[in-house]
């Protein structure tokens, strides 16, 4: 009788991590950045119908990089979880932290127990009533959670983008215009020199709005802000 092929647990985890990283590296990058009135999301996304940034709850936004079908499934699961929790308890109990913990458990289980891990990275942001109340989380393919401040990025060119942003700023941008300008520069110099405003998906969490804080920014409005 033939002996089954043996792979050590360490080698198996390493292979899964490399597989997931290769898939994420093919994905286009996304930046989340705090500014004086909220949180700005900018994604390198030439599609006008397949969004990479979306609303999860009243004041919480979600974005994903990597395999679209996988982070879309996670987005839908997050919306269902948030709606159920908000109805069973209260709307204040739905937080980016609780959603990040849920995504972390799901991705961690998939990474350690399934043959194929998810090839995704996630960004979650919640806008607070004051800038100090903002929450910004990055969740990696293996379920690790990183609590970020001021700005962060995910996707294939995230390291180059973060290197550029760390050189340019260390604090919250004073306005939406300044934050958008900085993000556009990061894509041009850190990710894709050919990047244009028409190929960027822009959305914000605006604390000055009543009710739902999430809003998409049209290309015409973004162009006016940068002019």
Image (cartoon, rainbow, N blue to C red):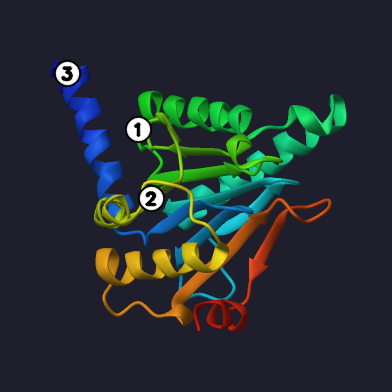
Name the side, left or right, on which 52 lies relative to 182.
right
Q: Secondary structure at mark 1?
A: loop
Quadrant (top left, top right, bottom left, bottom right) of the N terminus: top left
* Pointer 3 or 1: first along the chain: 3
Q: Where is 105 relative to 158, above or below?
A: above
Q: What numbered label is drawn on residue 8?
A: 3
Q: Which residue is mark 2?
A: 154
Dot 1, how many residues are within 10 Å of its Cα: few (below 14), some (14-19), or many (20+)?
A: few
Say which label, 2 or 3, has the lower sequence index: 3
For the residues labelled 2 and 3, the Cα–Cα distance comes to 30 Å
Residue 72, percent across and down? 56, 52
Q: Classify residue 18 by image quadrant.
A: top left
Q: How far from the left and from the top, in percent, is residue 24?
A: 33, 51
Quarter-wise, where is residue 125 in the image?
A: top right
Q: Residue at x 40, y 65 (%)?
A: 182
> Foreground residue, 172 or 40?
172
């Amino acid at each position: 009788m033939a002996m089954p092929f043996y792979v050590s647990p360490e080698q198996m985890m390493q292979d899964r991590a490399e597989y997931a990283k290769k898939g994420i590296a093919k994905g286009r990058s996304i930046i989340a950045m705090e500014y004086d009135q909220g949180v700005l999301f900018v994604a390198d996304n030439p599609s006008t119908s397949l969004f990479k940034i979306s609303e999860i709850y009243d004041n919480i936004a979600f974005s994903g990089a990597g395999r679209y079908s996988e982070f879309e499934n996670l987005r839908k699961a997050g919306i269902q979880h948030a709606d159920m929790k908000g109805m069973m308890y209260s709307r204040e109990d739905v937080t980016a932290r609780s959603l990040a913990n849920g995504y972390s458990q799901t991705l961690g289980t998939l990474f350690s127990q399934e043959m194929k891990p998810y090839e995704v990275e996630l960004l979650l942001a919640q806008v607070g009533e004051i800038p100090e109340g903002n929450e910004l989380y990055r969740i990696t393919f293996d379920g690790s959670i990183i609590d970020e401040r001021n700005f962060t990025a995910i996707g294939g060119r995230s390291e180059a983008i973060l290197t550029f942003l760390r050189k340019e700023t260390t604090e919250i941008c004073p306005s939406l215009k300044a934050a958008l300008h900085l993000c556009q520069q990061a894509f041009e110099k850190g990710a894709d020199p050919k990047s244009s405003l028409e190929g960027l998906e822009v959305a914000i969490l605006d604390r000055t709005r009543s009710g739902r804080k999430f809003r998409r920014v049209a290309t015409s409005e973004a162009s006016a802000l940068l002019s």
